[in-house]
């Protein structure tokens, strides 16, 4: 069932799965079945990647099947994230293999490719009635240490996976953020057709020396 909470208004029509994707902080306690988790990560793995390297790796901790892994990921989060993440049924971490397998050289697209794999997963999640919430608010060192992650892998993000739930489980401030109007920059601010925008308000040739 689609999550129609706080759908994103857009300048031009786009896929409903994109406007319905959001980063909720309230989840039901309903576990995410293993087969569904596998569908989500299959979607992630369908993404394009530089040299076809597929540098993405995911650590998954479902409360139901791997509570220790869930607890370790939860413990690595900042306190402000733990407040709401503790109610989610699944936590995952995305990691990037930072070198190419074919020649051992650094892969400067690794984090880019992991990002787009997780973005693809997020869209598949919407289609399955789920949502994810990505976080940068975690300790790299804590995740690395508690899962013995080799140095070659960068920990990119931690994210919840779950079925969106009732907002009354959240503290007031967080509840307000769930229903605050959503919006995005207008296209004119980030799409430059035909060339890089020229400064119209500043004239360097007239600047005082
Ligand atoms: C890489 C990344 C890091 C983020 N870190 C956090 C975080 O630590 N805590 C949090 O509550 N939200 C975090 N967010 C969620 C963003 O605040 C959210 O995606 C943004 O406000 C847009 O909202 P939407 O995803 O609902 O469209 C993060 C999102 C991304 C992509």
Image (tube, rainbow, N blue to C red):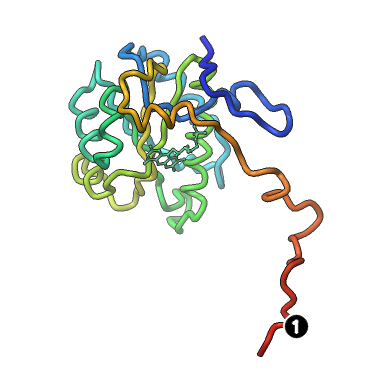
Q: Position of residue 82 (x, y in %)?
A: 26, 34
Q: Quadrant of residue 158?
A: top left
Give the camera-side residue of 50 and 30: 30
Identity of the residue drawn at 76% across and 65% down = 198
Q: Tell me if 23 is positioned left or right of 198 in this view.
A: left
Q: Residue furthest right?
A: 194
Give the camera-side residue of 178 and 150: 178
- Name the residue tied to disc 1: 206
- Neighbour tally class for label 1: few under 14, some 14-19, many 20 plus, Cα within 10 Å: few
Identity of the residue drawn at 45% across and 43% down = 55
Q: Quadrant of residue 134?
A: top left
Quadrant where the C terminus is found in the figure: bottom right
Q: Position of residue 85 (x, y in %)?
A: 30, 29
203 shown above or below 56: below
196 shown above or below 188: below
Q: Position of residue 151 (x, y in %)?
A: 29, 52
The CB of the residue at mark 1 lies under 8 Å from ligand 1: no
Q: Residue furthest top?
A: 1
Give the camera-side residue of 1 and 94: 1
Q: Tell me if 14 is positioned left or right of 139 in this view.
A: right
Asked which secondary structure carries label 1, the reply is helix
167 shown above or below 72: above
Please tell me how many numbered marks the rendered image carries. 1
Q: Quadrant of residue 187?
A: top right
Identity of the residue drawn at 55% across and 42% down = 49
């Amino acid at each position: 069932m689609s999550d129609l909470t706080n759908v994103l208004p857009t300048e031009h029509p786009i896929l409903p799965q994109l406007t319905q994707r959001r980063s909720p902080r309230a989840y039901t306690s309903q576990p995410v079945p293993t087969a569904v988790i596998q569908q989500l990560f299959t979607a992630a793995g369908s993404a394009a990647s530089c040299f076809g390297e597929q540098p993405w790796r995911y650590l998954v901790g479902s409360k139901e099947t791997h509570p220790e892994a869930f607890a370790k990921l939860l413990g690595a989060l900042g306190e402000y994230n733990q407040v709401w993440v503790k109610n989610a049924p699944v936590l995952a971490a995305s990691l990037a293999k930072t070198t190419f397998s074919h020649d051992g050289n650094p892969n400067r697209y690794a984090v880019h490719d992991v990002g787009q794999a997780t973005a693809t997963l997020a869209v598949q999640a919407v289609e399955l009635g789920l949502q994810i919430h990505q976080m940068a608010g975690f300790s790299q060192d804590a995740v690395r240490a508690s899962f013995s992650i080799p140095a070659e892998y960068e920990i990119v993000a931690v994210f919840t996976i779950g079925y969106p739930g009732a907002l009354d489980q959240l503290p007031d401030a967080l509840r307000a953020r769930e229903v605050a109007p959503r919006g995005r920059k207008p296209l004119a601010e980030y799409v430059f057709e035909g060339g890089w925008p020229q400064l119209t308000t500043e004239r360097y040739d007239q600047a005082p020396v």
